[in-house]
Structures are given as C-alpha cells and as structure tokens.
Amino acid sequence: KLICSGVDVLTMSATPIPRTLQMSLSGIRDTSTLQSPPPMRKPIQTQVSQVDDDIIYEAISTELDRGGQCFYVVPRISMMAEAESRIMELFPGIAIISAHGRMGRNMAEQNVAAFAEGNYQVLLATTVIENGVDIPSVNTILIQNAENFGMSTLYQLRGRVGRSDQQAYAYFLHSGESVTEQAAMRLQAIGDLSALGSGFDVANRDLEIRGAGSLLGTEQSGEAARVGFDLYMRMLKKSIRQLRGLDVPVVPRTNFLEIEEANLEFFFIKDSSSSSSPLIPASYIPDLDQRYQAETSARLAESTAALVNITQEWKQTYGIPLPAELQTSLKTLHLHCCTKRIGIDVVGIHNGDCILRSPGLRPRHLQKILELLPQTKLPNGLRMIFPSRLTNKDDRGEDEAEFTDNKGVMDLKTLLQNPMFGDDNEDSDENGGDDTEDWDALDREEAMAMKEISSAMQLKGKLRKQDFVDHPRYIVPDFASQPDKIHTLLQCLLPLSKAIYTQQEYDKTAAKIATELREKRELITKQRKKQKKNELDAMRINHSEMVNRQYGIGNGGGILNKPEQQQKRV
C-alpha cells in the first residue's frame, strides 16, 4: 500500500472467526455486510433433533420423491461405513457414493463430479464438501453427530443446499446425552439463525460463545462469556486506549491536492513521492539497479530520522555534494514523512491558507504533543482548529474552536477534564461506572476518522470547504505568499513530527522492555516452582531413607512391606 497508492485490501468471509470479527467490532478493522441473497433463493428450513432412523428416512425419501439428491455428512471417516449401512437398510438398492480426504489423488473430486452428473442419489462425505461444492439439484443435507462440528462449519455445510429456487432442508442430528453445553449452544444458534444472509449473526453468536481469543497471539477464540461480550468489548477498548499512548493515526499516504490558480507555483502539483517520478538523477547513481534500490529505500522511510540516515549512506557511498534536484526531492520526502507521522491525510490551499487535515487528531493528542515541544506551544506560523463536536464549545452554538496562544483561546486543560475528549478517567468506576453514551460516541468518532483517512486519496482537484470544515486541522496562514513553500511547511511540521516519533519510539522501547521483564519474571517463577518441587522431592526421599535406616528395613519397598515384618513389628 505504500508503494502503490491504488491498492486496496478486501477480506471476504461468510463466517469470520471470533478474533477477526472482534477486530472489526472493536474498530481495528472496518467491516460491512452483504445481506442481499441471489434472486429466487429461499431460506433453508433447519431442524435440530436427535439421531433417529425415522427422521433420516423421511428426509431422504421426501427429496428422492421430487427427483433430487442428498448430502449425508459425518464428522469422521471411521463413521462412514456405519452410516452407509444405516442408509442401505432404510433404502435397499439406493445409489451411494463417498468422498473424504484420505482417498487417492483426484478420487474425491471424481466422485463428487459423478454425483453432480446425477449418477448417484446420496453423497456420503466428511467436511471435504464444506467449500467449493455447488450442485443445484441437491436440496437436502443431513449432518450426523452435529455436536462435533464448529459453528462456521455447520453454517458452511448448510450452505451446500438451497442453491436454486427449490425449498431446501437441513437436518442437524446430534447424539443426545453426550452433547456438551457449548455444543448445545451452537446447535440452538444454528437452528435459530436460518434466514438468508445470517452469516454475520452466526459469527457474532460464535464470538459470544467462544470469546475473542488473542489479538496478537495464536488463539482464535477465548473466554469472553465469563464477563459478557459487551463488558468485554468495553474493557478491551479501554485497555487499548490506555496502552496506545500518543496514538495519532499514521496515514499510509498524504494526498496533496492540486491547485487550480495559475499564479501559485505550488510544489505538490507533481507528487514527488509517486513511484512513477524519478527521485535520483542518473548522474549521481549511474547503476540502474542501485538507483532503484536507493529510491525504494527512500520512499519507504517511515521517519525523517530514517531519511537522514539514508542520505548519509548515499554521501559515503556515492560522494558529496548531492545534486540540487535530489536535495529538493529529499525535502519533499521529508515533508511526506512529517505529514504521515502527524496524521495529516489531505493538504491543500483555501483562501490563500494552507489546510492540513488531520481527522484522527484529538485534544488529548494535542496536549501530549505540546508537552513534548520545547516551549510547550505550537511552532510559529501554525494554528490548530478543532470542530465543535470535539470541544466544549458545542453547547455555545459555535462551529469550531481554535487553539492559539492569544487571550481568550480554547481552555485545553478544562476541555481535557471531560473523559469524552481527554484521557480515560481511572475513577469512573468508583463514581458510578463509565458513561456508555460517551464511550459509544468516542468509538463512532474513531471509526469515522479511520474511514476519512482511508478515503482521502479519492479527493481530486481543488480543496473545498466541505472537505475539511468538520475535521481537526492545522492551518498555515498566508501560505500562498510564501516564497519557499516546502521550507515553510517543514519549519511548522518538523518539530511536531520529531516529538511524536521520539515519544512513539520511547513507548515501543518501554513496551519491549516491559515484555522482556514479564517473560523474565515468569521464567524466574517457573524456576522457583521447579526448585521448590525438587526440594520437596529430596525431603521426601531423605525422610524415607531415614525411616528405613531407623527401622532396619532394606529396599523392599516400605516400613511394613512384608506380612511377617508387619507381624513382628506388632
């Protein structure tokens, strides 16, 4: 996504695993649902019951009477012979074919193809038919021992039927008394959620049953049911906010909008970060491969510090001084690093001022940034404006609030006392709990900010007022009259970018150290437990040896290891 700006990533799933769904619900990933079924499709009639020959006979005979075919699914290959015998007893002479994962090369595919051609009436299979099987003539599926399948597998198996305008039927047959509590919850959910397009609801119910798992680990499910899903999500979001620190969203690429006024020779009419424009002249690095490698490393630099290191390597390798055009391109790359680090997704001109839109910036971020700056104030020539919904001026009917150093400015300290805009209040639980509406509003704000950042590259042409008026933004006044526009923006943005980068690197290092200390503590705890266990074992051995020596017993096995010894001792 950094190299090619036009690349988008879309992940599609009928039933996402709990961890993936939880990432979407918590705002880490964006999500949307497609609930419109293909034309003429009908909801699959679902029945959950205990395994019974009468139900099997009725289901298969009803489908065969209307000229259709059936799927019969078992959880294990070892159960296929017994299932085939049961079907043959109910329907002597019926044509059955099997498919499972241990068949020879292409044998399962050939059997499924023969079944699709109508040569057989029942396909006896395992979960190999869960995906990629589309046979419109099959509109009845029976799943034996359904309690052994997961929620998404049950949903996918049910989706193998009903792929035409015929009414489809799905029978989930369980073994009765051996059904666990979680299995019963899964079967109840799959029986209740039978409407078309209910995959998202099925995944959500699976998330409630199994939990969300580990975001950064390998566990795909967890124990969210112990505290309840809603409370778990709120606890997770609060913990994320407390751990993120200076969590200004880093945009993948800043959109420098073109300027239509002919009298403004603006530097970002041609985007120097585009991979289609040459960065290093051939006169400086003659070798084509080395030049492309150097350009790639420069364009992928995540900070101005990384760009400085790359430039120093170029000087040592290819000589000094750098060509003038390369110096200009490097200044533009420095500017791109600054805007991405600060969270600026759109830059443009409006009424002679430079507007730098930052949808993800919040007052709590500004407070931390100001604390990191040398004079605890914005650089000269840079202003900051928040829309009214992010300030305490919304009740006064004002559209926006500007943060400057003049008298009568927005009181940032008072504003940050509101947990809606500031840091999370640790005493909120003692004062009656968190305000659910404030939490929901904050979640919506963050989700909207991420959507604005992801859609920033779609803006084209001249910057319009509606493109920035509802978002936090930096402003450089009278920017159109500045002779060196790149230098002006770098003077304003470099201090902010360096402060944010330094603090974020410090937070990363602190988190890494904390992780290492935690692992060391866990290792020390394990070693102590092992040492204590070894000491207890040694004490038991010593005590046993002492007793044996005291009573004159050898290695026969104990104090009273023989009947005659027991009688003698009595």
Image: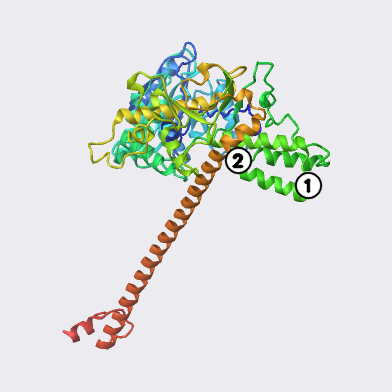
Q: Quadrant of the N terminus?
A: top right
- Figure quadrant of residue 439: top left
Residue drawn at x 37%, y 32% is 411
The residue at which mark 2 appears reads as 302
Q: Nearer the viewer, residue 472 or 130?
A: 472
Q: Secondary structure at mark 1?
A: loop
Residue drawn at x 33%, y 27% is 48
Residue drawn at x 39%, y 27% is 390
Mark nearer the N terminus (1 vs 2): 2
Q: Nearer the viewer, residue 36 or 178?
A: 36
Residue 93 locus on image (x, y percent): 47, 25
Q: Is residue 100 above or below residue 260?
A: below
Q: Secondary structure at mark 2?
A: loop
Can residue 246 be seen here? The reply is no
The residue at which mark 1 appears reads as 320
Of the two numbered discs 1 and 2 in the rendering, the one whose residue sits closer to the viewer: 1
Q: CA distance from mark 1 to mark 2?
A: 24 Å
Query: Label 2 neighbourhood size at 10 Å, few (<14), some (14-19), many (20+)?
Result: some
- Figure quadrant of residue 410: top left
Kindly identify the amino acid type of the residue bearing the numbered disc 2: Glu
Q: Nearer the viewer, residue 483 or 549?
A: 483
Toward the front, the furthest residue is 407
Q: Is 116 on the left-hand or right-hand side of 518?
A: right
Can residue 521 be seen here? The reply is yes
Kindly identify the amino acid type of the residue bearing the numbered disc 1: Ile
Query: Label 1 neighbourhood size at 10 Å, few (<14), some (14-19), many (20+)?
Result: few
